Image: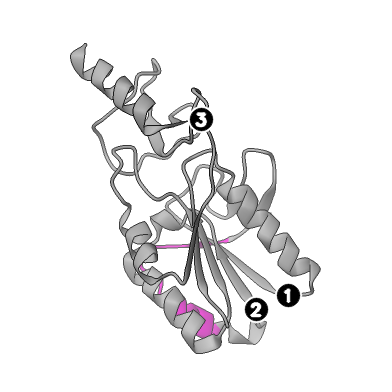
Amino acid sequence: MAKLYFRYGVMGSSKSAQALITKFNYEEQGMHVWLLKPARDTRDGSNIVRSRIGLEQKADAIGEEVDLFAVFQAREKEFYEVIIVDEAQFLMPSQVEQLRHIVDTYHIPVLCFGLRTDFRTKLFPASARLFELADSISELKTVCACGSKAMVNARLDKEGHVLTEGEQVFLGGSESYRPMCYRCWKKATKKELEE
């Protein structure tokens, strides 16, 4: 039975690497994979999925207005057997619903990889919808500098101070974000508030 999967984790938890490894594994079995990423993620170019360890693949960039179900129907002749979405937190909630519809109509697996929460520990709208609709949810883990499990995407300013205010979406890599456990994040944000 096909399922909608959500694999989430903080920055640095190998989400993109896992997405690309999963794509490779399906292709090794002779299956056709449709690799997608939201167009608003332009860090590595709008049509490239790149991991921090150097893996990369071309992907179809999807804008916020794109109806994924309609596009999949139009491309049905290409016979995709699995869909993989990187940076799924940047989807629109309606696009998550469209992916769910693809799973149920075409009986193919859809695997979404993305962040659960932003730097303020608030759910991204698409991530919230994935938690509501996914058949299978699993966490990809990494560690904080203290050795504990990281669960917060701490946003940093240019001096390395942890920020608590700003737009929900700010594209950046390890120079702008650090995975932290909640205890270290709380300590860092309290310190910043006192200064």
Q: Earlier in the sequence, mark 3 or mark 1?
A: 1
Above/below status of 43 relative to 39: above
The residue under label 1 is 31
Number of marks:
3
Q: Residue at x 73, y 61 (%)?
A: 24
Q: Can residue 3 be seen from the camera position used here?
A: yes
Which image quarter holds the C terminus? top left
Structural distance between the alpha carbons of marks 2 and 3: 34 Å
Q: Residue at 26% of width from left, 17% of height from top?
A: 192
Mark 2: give few (<14), some (14-19) or many (20+) Cα within 10 Å. some
Q: Amino acid at mark 2?
A: Glu
Taking the magenta stretch, the answer to whether it contains residue 68 is: yes
Q: Earlier in the sequence, mark 2 or mark 3?
A: 2
In the image, what residue occupies the spot 35% across and 60% down?
A: 126
In this figure, which residue is indicated by the disc labeled 2?
81
The amino acid marked with disc number 1 is Met
Q: Which residues are magenta?
A: 60-74
The residue lying at 30 percent from left, 27 percent from top is 186
